[in-house]
Amino acid sequence: MGLKFYVGEMQTQAAEAARMSNEANLAIAQLQDSISHFLSAPLSGKAYDSAKSYFSVVYTPLCRSALMTGEAMQQAHKRLVTEYQSSVSGIDTDEDQIQSQIEQLEQLKRNLEHQMQVSKNFQPSLERRYMNACDSISKKREKLEKFHAYNARSSSFFAEYEASQQEFSRGLAQVNGCKAWNSASGSFDISKLDMTWATSINKRWEAREQQLEALKKKVVKDAIAKLDGYEIRRVKNGNKIDWIILKNGKILNSKNNSELYSVLELYGDLLPKGSYTQMVVKKGIVDPTIALPGVGGAANIKNVVKGIGTIIISTGILTLLNDAPSVSFSDSNADEVDIEIPKDVQRKIKKLSPEQKKALDEALDKLSKGDKTGLNDHALKGDRKGERAFDIRGKGTGNNRGGIRGTYEKDGPGKIKLKDVFKGHKY
């Protein structure tokens, strides 16, 4: 009976090995956690000290061996599939079936050869069929050769697993029967155990840790490389860290550049110090020695609060409404007022001309400081009682062409809510 390999079955087997390994890892992790808590417990005395030493010396390598045995089993099953697919075929292989096909092709080849010999004239079609049969036979034999070569080396895929399993069994044999327990002294005596099995386990564990660290460094290096060509700003606000990414002086929105911002969220702390600019929020004010990129002179942003439908702003923040990611700055100065701008008003502001935005920005800056000079600030009447309005004169002529009116209301101590903004108001 010839060799057979069914890709689907082997993939299912590999998935089952991975599941078993993961379940075992969870159980081992819980055991390690329990041992760690026991070793760190404030217990003393001969019995406790001997128990701590016993669990540390014996169970630590035993748990490590169990983890590495599971990993080796998972890797061996995975390798069975991947090496078959890369060296033999991406589909199932049945040696008996292929041998039968080769025999049929050999018979066809003999028949064609006989027809060509008895034919009085050269027959190109017979020649082509003969060559195709030869080519098919060659390819099928080559596949069988690769299949047998793969089969010969496949047993080595499990060598690490088998060696690891033997080490684990040796360690487990030392634990079984509590060989280290001395009932006379009421303590554990590790000298009664053969601990030679633990030496190779601990060495392999150290090598494993070094490999994982090297892999982690490569993953981090490759991820950080994606940030090449971008300007990075690290904003520290108390214990909170926010990141800002710029390209050609323009702030990139986190929603449209989630992959880049994810790199910073995961590996930002590992960035070299010289690869980003540090920004610090002190008493709710961005450090005045560092200007926030893209905002011009507006380095004293007081509040940009993350939330649905609302941004709380003050000086210079209108220039960020189009493309800035949300950045949280809290605890604004008591002598200034926060201005809340709902999203429907934000949309209207975005439609203003650059000159109108600048004028509105300056007007809001005045209001936040309690300065109403030149704003024609006044109370509204009727069904809008409780609201106030301010006017910004336009540069055009007649009917205040280019002018803006804004309406607002007080929304608690130190807070103003902008209700509406519209152009061309007459006054």
Image (cartoon, rainbow, N blue to C red):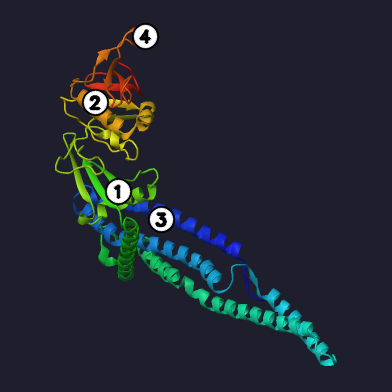
Which part of the image, by quadrant, shows the N terminus? bottom right
Three-letter code, disc 1:
Leu
Q: Secondary structure at mark 4?
A: helix
* Cα–Cα span, label 1 and label 2: 28 Å
Q: Point out which mark residue 89 bears.
A: none
* Cα–Cα span, label 4 and label 2: 25 Å
Residue shown at the point (24%, 32%) measured from the top left: 303
* Residue 362 visible: yes
132 displayed left or right of 166: right
Q: Which residue is mark 4?
A: 383
Q: Position of residue 64 (x, y in %)?
A: 35, 61
Three-letter code, disc 3:
Asn
Q: Point out which mark residue 363 bears.
A: 2
Three-letter code, disc 4:
Asp
Residue closer to the observer: 157 or 147:
147
Three-letter code, disc 2:
Ala
Question: On the image, which quarter does residue 371 sit in?
Answer: top left
* Cα–Cα span, label 3 and label 1: 42 Å
Upstream in sequence: badge 2 or badge 3: 3
Q: Which residue is mark 1?
A: 246
